[in-house]
Amino acid sequence: MTSNDPKLPPTEDEQLFNQLLTKVHTEEELKKHHFTMVSTCICDRWGRPTGGVIRYNEFAQTPEHKEDATKRQAIVLDCEMVIVEGYRKELASLVVADLITGEILINHFVHPTNIVRNWQTRYSGITCAAMKAAVKENIAIRGWKAARTMLFDLMDSKTIIVGHAVYNDLNSLGIIHPTIIDTSILTADAVYRPLGRPFRRTWRLKTLADELIGQKIQSGKCGHSALEDTMATRDVLLHCTRNPLELEAWAEKARSEEPVKCEPETNEPETLEEWFARR
């Protein structure tokens, strides 16, 4: 599958990257939306993110930027998870694309390190048979640590990571990263910032793809496709970046559908059941 957006000429690449830099979330925003920070890992080394298998002392910061190293400027990613022993979710699929060009960089199953209790196929799109076949053919990544290493080969601390509710994906990889654009935060902020309100809700990627770019995703009965979700996230962000008036119009319509009185978004991370259902 390829993105709807063709490869951009270099001058446009630079312009786009500069536009993306203005949308990177602050550290305060990341903390508010449950991203794992260095301070989290120091204060609770043996704890874990809600529902995850990776302890905070196993998290790693992305490599420091080096001028002589060639790394991607911006990447977009999506992970799919399964439920393993202990009723925790573990990484089982990783897709990474270059945000600027749309080039697919990683598209692999990730063999879980724990016994899988539920493949959550209706959400993850992953079956036991498909994973076994990938492992047998030696095309599955061997666990989340190997997946993280593969990702770190592509990026450094200055690389912009893009995703939808991407704190979940980063937690499944055990990654702490400072340079992030999350389409769920970006679009909710467009709705609620003019109202001076905390987020009451965020919008599913499926809804954003449909309403902003007219793209139908997650429409089959075989679960999500990490590749489809990755490219849809890219297309949504590019659309919002290049067409701010259309984002504003969408946000205005969303505001008009909001109740006059509403409760702010809870500061508590969602449960495992909520996480699988809302994606």
Image (cartoon, helix red, strand yellow):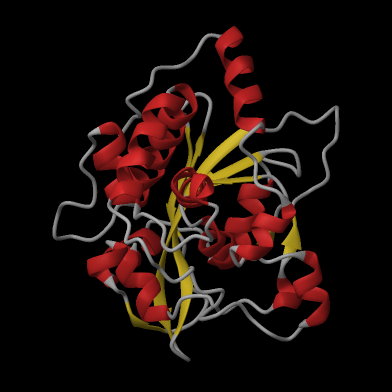
* Quadrant for the C terminus in the image: bottom left
Side of 74 where 135 appears, left or right: left
Q: Which x, y percent locates residue 24?
A: 65, 41
**Can residue 55 be seen from the camera position used here?**
yes
Farthest-out residue, bottom? 86
In this view of the protein, which residue sits in the foreground, 222 or 136? 222
**Residue at the location (27% across, 61% down)?**
125
Q: Which x, y percent locates residue 248?
A: 41, 33
Q: State which quadrant residue 224 falls in.
A: bottom left
* Quadrant for the N terminus in the image: top left
In this view of the protein, which residue sits in the foreground, 48 or 173? 48
Q: State which quadrant residue 79 falls in.
A: bottom left
Q: State which quadrant residue 171 falls in.
A: bottom right
**Residue at the location (37% across, 76% down)?**
274
In this view of the protein, which residue sits in the foreground, 142 or 264? 264
Q: Which x, y percent locates residue 118?
A: 32, 81
Side of 136 where 55 appears, left or right: right
**Residue at the location (32% across, 64% down)?**
124
Vertical placement of residue 15 versus 75, above or below = above
**Can residue 139 be seen from the camera position used here?**
no
Q: Which x, y percent locates residue 278?
A: 33, 66
Farthest-out residue, front? 260
Side of 256 where 63 appears, left or right: right
Vertical placement of residue 18 versus 214, above or below = above
Vertical placement of residue 196 versus 16, above or below = below
Side of 56 where 196 appears, left or right: left
In this view of the protein, which residue sits in the foreground, 87 or 209? 209
